[in-house]
């Protein structure tokens, strides 16, 4: 299996695995006052320092969570529920862990504006500015899109918000650990970090909350993580996240250069072998490891299924009983339903080799040719 689905999740780095295994020997509860508890607390705080260092924050601005979904809910619902009413600006291309909390807030009476991207997948900062109202309390725009890899102009949006009291959150699940991310340079008040997107374990993440920003919990319990993410800490997960952050900071330059090189090699090879390919978000700044391509003459879910034992890629579309729903992100960018249903995401990682890339080009091309020749397939039924 050639694994090219690193935006879904990454393999756990061997150094991270070793750190997690070592942490299992320090079995105390970080809330306990005895020496074993204190030792456990120390390794949790050491991990907090590493996560903070990766994104240019202070350690006490980092809240450990169970992952991106909790972080996004805590940022959005946790901030907005302090207000009886209000208005939130976000976008149509956000992850469901942002969209669905916004829909819940809408049911509670909060007004929500979802901005449409341009054809490149970019949210215009001017659109954010135009939609600010007197009652706007929060803006939440993702840093890099999980499907296209398109990087949003977060710094420019932050400039528009600088003279207001509006809080700015960004979901940086896909960018942290893949490219340099600094909360001060971005100008954000809250930022979501997800461990398993950059070679850490699943089930753990973090939320950067700028000093002075007040949140209310969205789940209730004891006082862990300042009462904002209550429950006994996932110590091995937190240690793994801390180690992944340390490695990402150490290896960032090499990681960016290498994934960019092999991703460009992959795109050139597919264009040469297949032809009739369109790179979605081609004119926008993108993550160095991400390709979202429309391959004419195929249905993406069929290609993903056909390749499933040889090459791991993904599709933003979903098909059930012959009925296909295209990616909301690609539709929002202006792709036709047909093109959206023919688009796949391929995301490389630091562990992919050039040999794997060459082999993946051959395999993907072979499967595309076979699917294009297939008669009476799903594409014909949908669009004939």
Image: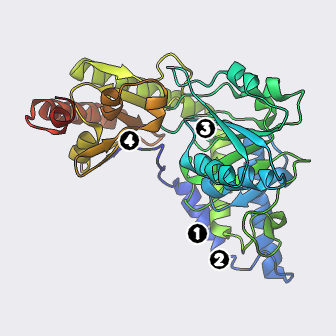
For marks 4 and 2, give the one nearer the viewer: 4
Does the CB distance between marks 3 and 4 fall below 8 Å? no
> What element does badge 4 sit on?
loop
Q: Residue at x 59, y 28 (%)?
A: 151
Q: Earlier in the sequence, mark 2 or mark 3?
A: 2
From the top left corner, tell me how far across and down residue 370 is, in percent: 12, 34
Ranked by sequence position, the earlier of labels 4 and 1 is 4
Q: Earlier in the sequence, mark 3 or mark 1?
A: 1
Answer whether residue 112 is visible to the viewer in this image: yes
What residue is drawn where x is 65% and y is 77%?
A: 25
In percent of width and height, residue 134 lies at 85, 33
Report the disc number at residue 25.
2
Q: Report the mark closest to the observer, 2 or 3.
A: 3
Q: Nearer the viewer, mark 4 or mark 1?
A: 4
Q: Which residue is mark 1?
A: 21
Q: Which residue in the rendered view is the most extreme toward the bottom?
A: 34
Which residue is under mark 4?
Answer: 4
Answer with mark 3 or mark 4, whichever residue precedes in sequence. 4
Q: Nearer the viewer, residue 136 or 214?
A: 136
| Marks 1 and 2 in Cβ contact (< 8 Å) | yes
**Element class at badge 2:** loop
The residue wearing badge 3 is: 175
Front residue of 330 and 115:
115
Secondary structure type for disc 3: loop
Q: How many marks?
A: 4
**114 to 269, vertically: above or below:** below
Looking at the rendering, which quadrant does residue 15 occupy?
Answer: bottom right
Residue at 73% x, 40% y: name it.
Answer: 88
């Amino acid at each position: 299996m050639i694994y090219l689905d690193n935006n879904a999740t990454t393999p756990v780095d061997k150094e991270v695995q070793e750190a997690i295994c070592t942490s299992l020997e320090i079995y105390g509860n970080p809330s306990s006052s005895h020496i074993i508890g204190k030792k456990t607390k120390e390794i949790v705080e050491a991990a907090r320092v590493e996560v903070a260092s990766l994104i240019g924050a202070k350690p006490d601005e980092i809240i450990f969570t169970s992952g991106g979904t909790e972080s996004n809910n805590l940022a959005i619902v946790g901030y907005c529920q302090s207000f009886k009413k209000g208005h939130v600006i976000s976008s149509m291309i956000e992850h469901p862990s942002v969209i669905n909390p916004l829909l819940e807030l809408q049911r509670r009476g909060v007004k929500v504006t979802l901005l449409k991207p341009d054809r490149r997948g970019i949210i215009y900062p001017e659109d954010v500015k135009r939609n600010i109202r007197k009652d706007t309390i929060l803006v939440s725009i993702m840093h890099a899109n999980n499907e296209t890899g398109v990087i949003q102009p977060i710094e420019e949006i932050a400039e528009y918000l600088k003279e207001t009291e509006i809080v700015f959150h960004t979901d940086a699940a896909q960018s942290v650990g893949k490219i340099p991310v600094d909360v001060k340079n971005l100008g954000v008040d809250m930022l979501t970090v997800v461990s398993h997107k950059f070679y850490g374990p699943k089930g753990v993440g973090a939320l950067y909350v700028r000093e002075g920003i007040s949140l209310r919990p969205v789940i209730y319990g004891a006082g862990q993580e300042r009462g904002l993410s209550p429950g006994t800490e996932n110590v091995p997960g937190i240690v793994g996240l801390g180690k992944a952050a340390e490695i990402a900071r150490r290896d960032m330059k090499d990681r960016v250069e290498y994934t960019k090189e092999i991703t460009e090699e992959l795109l050139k090879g597919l264009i040469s072998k297949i032809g009739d390919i369109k790179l979605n978000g081609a004119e926008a700044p993108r993550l160095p490891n991400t390709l979202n391509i429309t391959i004419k003459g195929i249905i993406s879910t069929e290609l993903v299924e056909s390749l499933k034992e040889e090459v791991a890629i993904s599709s933003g579309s979903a098909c059930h009983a012959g009925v296909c729903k295209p990616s909301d992100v690609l539709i929002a960018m202006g792709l036709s339903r047909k093109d959206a249903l023919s688009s796949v995401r391929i995301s490389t990682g630091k562990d992919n080799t050039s040999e794997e890339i060459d082999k993946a080009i051959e395999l993907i091309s072979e499967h595309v040719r076979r699917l294009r020749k297939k008669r009476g397939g799903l594409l014909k039924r949908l669009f004939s």
